[in-house]
Image: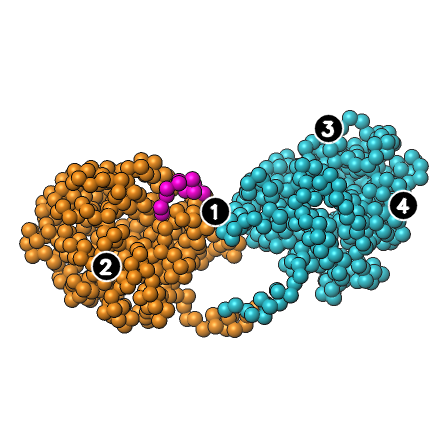
Chain colours: A orange, B cyan
Amino acid sequence: MVDIATRVYNHKWKIDPIVRSLIDTDFYKLLMCQSVFRNKPDTEVSFSIINRSTDIRLAELIDEGELREQLDHIRTLRLTRGESTWLRGNTFYGKRQMFRPDFMEWYENLQLPPYTLEKRDGQYELTFEGRWPEVMMWEIPALAVLMELRGRAVLAHMGKFELQVLYARAMTKLWEKVERLKPLDKLKVADFGTRRRHSFLWQDWCVQAMMEGLGDKFVGTSNCLIAMRHDIEAIGTNAHELPMVYAALAETDAALREAPYKVLADWHEEHDGNLRIILPDTYGTRGFLDNAPDWLAGWTGIRIDSGNPFEGAETAIRWWQDRGEDPTQKLIIFSDGLDVDLIHDLYDRFKDRAKISFGWGTLLTNDFRGLVPDDGLAPFSLVCKAVSANGRPTVKLSDNPNKAMGPEAEIARYKRVFGVGEQVAREVVV
Amino acid sequence: MVDIATRVYNHKWKIDPIVRSLIDTDFYKLLMCQSVFRNKPDTEVSFSIINRSTDIRLAELIDEGELREQLDHIRTLRLTRGESTWLRGNTFYGKRQMFRPDFMEWYENLQLPPYTLEKRDGQYELTFEGRWPEVMMWEIPALAVLMELRGRAVLAHMGKFELQVLYARAMTKLWEKVERLKPLDKLKVADFGTRRRHSFLWQDWCVQAMMEGLGDKFVGTSNCLIAMRHDIEAIGTNAHELPMVYAALAETDAALREAPYKVLADWHEEHDGNLRIILPDTYGTRGFLDNAPDWLAGWTGIRIDSGNPFEGAETAIRWWQDRGEDPTQKLIIFSDGLDVDLIHDLYDRFKDRAKISFGWGTLLTNDFRGLVPDDGLAPFSLVCKAVSANGRPTVKLSDNPNKAMGPEAEIARYKRVFGVGEQVAREVVV
């Protein structure tokens, strides 16, 4: 029987909103936001969308009106009572009241700030300006909207059965990955795929498939809304935007050199246990670790997010050994460009040498490669980054020069300050 | 929104019926039934289920109570007004009022006769006895019920996502077949897969996928209910049960020798055009054609349903040429064990030498090979055949001795009467 009321209700939607909740975002944005809200609440920042896959001409694929409707819809969202209850009442990483009352009160009243949107050279210039805690919350929904609108543009031309078969193929593909991961006894893997997912519903399906297929080996999702709906762990720690903004705010080279450590000192005060994860690559992993204070070696683990991950993990293990720490008691989180083969290889190499965990992103939630003609649904490398703070440009060097960003002169200065020499370029797939 | 009424309505079902309509059957059963109803209405026949795949121990896989519930449910079915209207009002093979009023009146009052069910050696002995027009209507639903209950027994142990992925894989597999058939310009293919389908819903999906994927190259389905629902052609002509029962009724060897031609003489009186399709293999194609009366050469085509299909088609072409007919104006229907490779090969060889058409059966509607452990959903060779008529056993020789049936002494007698010598055995896949 057709539910007439449902049909009529659906007709009332002006658009089919891509992002329908303020917590349809990565958990680490909330952790970082709380930290920023406490330590740098009045910093004025600018965030921009950057499409590193310039051959994907988004402004020709995506209708500007539809994009504006989706972004405008996100600005109408407010934290719901149920979402607030979940954030206030839940245990994250074993800790109750992870989010302080003053932060929750602010979050309950948050409306995302205005955006500016222009077309240039076949791309959208989409920027967000304002106070850091507000602007940073745009990152994930803005990326998710652009990824999904590009997908919708391709799907719009497909027949009913073509669509059904497309998803059948995508499901089959994902399930084969899950089956290949099952035999890894000590596997710990989480969904990190919100930002470049194919769509919300697809990410939700992927998470449920991982829950059924991997059981305890699936340790959670970075997506708060999905974690809430399926009563699983919300996963994440911190990201490059913290050292990038702290560094941009530094007045001197000496202050700049200290900025990445200052980020972690602030973090140290707020968090312990599994939330003490070093992200060392913003200005080069090797220099960061060589110059790190000893208290950082006591942290729980390191996240490897660029460069050759085998080398990154070896560097981390050597560093812990040099500082008198036992690497087998440390956690290494791999989170860059993972797919099943790489997970297998990293698992085999490091499973007995450290605690390891995988944050599986785009190739979990958006592997539609090869499923439509001209590969029109293949994921691509879209990011949303802090580009300035209090009027000063931000810089990222990364362990992969293809992921570097910032004005050339500033990049040169950062390389000098952080002692970064030659770097090996690696293709950025997603 | 959940439709509460639908949920409550679903709770009222005692079982989930596999066959829900008397026209969820092959169209040719109705054509043959009408012929039998006119020519041999009082013949007492016995039909039996025969599982040629003896390694599939159905009585251990399928619960007897569930099987009885399904069969009992079929006995509660009656032709609905809408079904009757469709049969009376529709055009079949371009002809209106294909079904005579007296037949329709009889059909509208039909209840399928009782069955007897016993277990022996891990198999079910399921037999139907009574007047031919009634008993023959059991064939398709009985087969569909056994095939689907065996599938349900395997599916019962699977998780929600395992199930979803199973169907995703099956959809992908079918769609790849459809895509491989698309390039065949002059292709004509129909669904003949009711009897050994995976399930009704799956057959229905397959038909819709063929409609979207192949357009005009998909010429219809043998399933009347599915033809009615999607407003497409119902396809089919006649089958082995006619010559088998006519032959069993023959009192002398001379009458036996004439029986297969008598069937077609009766058919000739009733039907013309595309319904005049010879099924020559019941007692050996070569002898049948050699001894056939000339008027048969004037028929529209031949259906190749056993033996090597290339040789069968070559035999048919030579026969038409010998009788002064132009094979390029004749129709050859292939309907035995087809899958994409074989369709391709037959198409390439015969597309310019005759009109050709494919009745694609089990490997269209039930190709779940390789999709579950131990291949528990692979199709198998289950048939439901007339085994006696007025107390005398029936015999089938076929062009493949693995498809032969009947008492040994009778098989020998038939071989002698029809001049059948050595035959090449071919594996019966489905």
The chain to which mark 4 is attached is B
Q: In x, y percent, where is residue B332? A: 71, 41
Q: Residue at x 81, y 44 (%)?
A: B386
Q: Nearer the viewer, mark 3 or mark 1?
A: 1
Assign a secondary structure to mark 1: helix
Q: Amino acid at mark 2?
A: Met
Q: In x, y percent, where is residue B241? A: 80, 44
Question: How far is the residue under mark 3 from the one under mark 2?
Answer: 76 Å
Badge 3: few (under 14), some or many (20 or more) residues near its Cα, within 10 Å? few
Q: Residue at x 67, y 51 (%)?
A: B221
Question: How far is the residue under mark 4 from the one under mark 3?
Answer: 32 Å
Badge 4: few (under 14), some or many (20 or more) residues near its Cα, within 10 Å? some
Assign a secondary structure to mark 4: loop
The chain to which mark 2 is attached is A
- Residue B169 lies, with reference to residue A82, above or below; the image says above
Quadrant in the picture for residue A143 = bottom left
Q: Which residue is mark 4?
A: B390
Q: Which mark is residue A32?
A: 2
Assign a secondary structure to mark 3: loop
Q: Name the side, left or right, on which B19 lies relative to B154.
A: right
Question: How far is the residue under mark 1 from the one under mark 2?
Answer: 36 Å
Q: Nearer the viewer, mark 2 or mark 4?
A: 2
Residue B349 magenta-drawn?
no
Q: In x, y percent, where is residue A133? A: 22, 64
Residue A183 magenta-drawn?
yes
Question: How far is the residue under mark 2 from the one under mark 4?
Answer: 86 Å
Q: Which residue is mark 3?
A: B424
Bounds of the magenta segment? A179-189
Can residue B256 be seen in the rendering of this structure? Answer: yes
